[in-house]
Amino acid sequence: MAEQLRKYMEKLDDLPPFIRKNAEEIRELDEKVEGIMRVIEARTVAHVKNLKKTPMEQRVKWYKEVQALYKEADKLSERKVKLAQKMYDTVDMHIKEMDQQLVEFQEFQVKKYNETQAAKAGTSSSDNQKRKGSVSAMKTDKRKKPGDPKAARPDGASFVHTFKPSAITTVDMPVDPNEPTYCICHQGFSEVKFP
């Protein structure tokens, strides 16, 4: 079990540099997109002021230039979304692996605990008969109910009964309000939805 944990920790060593690299690339792409949007805004303001004086050919040329800039910004934004999705998927995969490792580790602990308890109690048939007799004695004794906290229990029995490996379930992470946005509208979280 310790060997599995060591191998998994080695796999996790690559995660922070991966996230840092992708976050820096997203930041660079975001700066480029914002620069393009500023250029579009400046050109639009300049052309709107002179719209009546501008000939039709010049308007068409300006329209095509702005359209090309929007396409470039859109391409960069799609790249940002893909990088963010790649980061999310990688982190999610590691979280799921950790959850699985945790379940396996807890099952391993319960198995070892049960083996230890069986070794302490002995596995001879006479011991089994004694245990069966004590269970039937507990059933007939109305004062000691199995759910009664004052009822006599063997050492560590409360640990075994409180552990439920099926209680661990995988849950999707809720949207973090501090999560950065990945679109130019600054409102999208994780998934960017277009109308």
Image (spheres, rainbow, N blue to C red):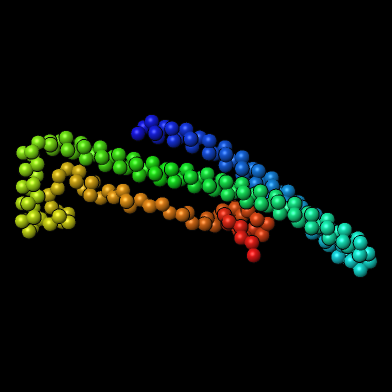
Determine the residue positioned at 63% across, 53% down.
Answer: 182
Q: Quadrant of residue 57?
A: bottom right
Nearest the camera: 145 or 57? 57
Nearest the camera: 129 or 158? 129
Q: Residue furthest bottom?
A: 52
Determine the residue positioned at 44% across, 46% down.
Answer: 96
Can residue 37 be seen from the camera position used here?
A: no
Residue 56 locus on image (x, y percent):
91, 65
Residue 27 locus on image (x, y percent):
66, 46
Q: Quadrant of the N terminus?
A: top left
Count of numbered marks: 0
Whether residue 132 sits left or right of residue 41 in the image: it is: left
Judge whether 50 appears above or below 83 on screen: below
Determine the residue positioned at 17% across, 54% down.
Answer: 149
Nearest the camera: 119 or 45? 119
Nearest the camera: 151 or 122? 122
Determine the residue positioned at 47% across, 33% down.
Answer: 10
Q: Quadrant of residue 16?
A: top right
Residue 126 locus on image (x, y percent):
5, 38
Can residue 55 be seen from the camera position used here?
A: yes
Q: Quadrant of residue 127?
A: top left
Whether residue 165 sits left or right of residue 45 in the image: it is: left
Q: Quadrant of the C terminus?
A: bottom right
Judge whether 167 appears above or below 129 on screen: below
Whether residue 51 sits left or right of residue 137 in the image: it is: right
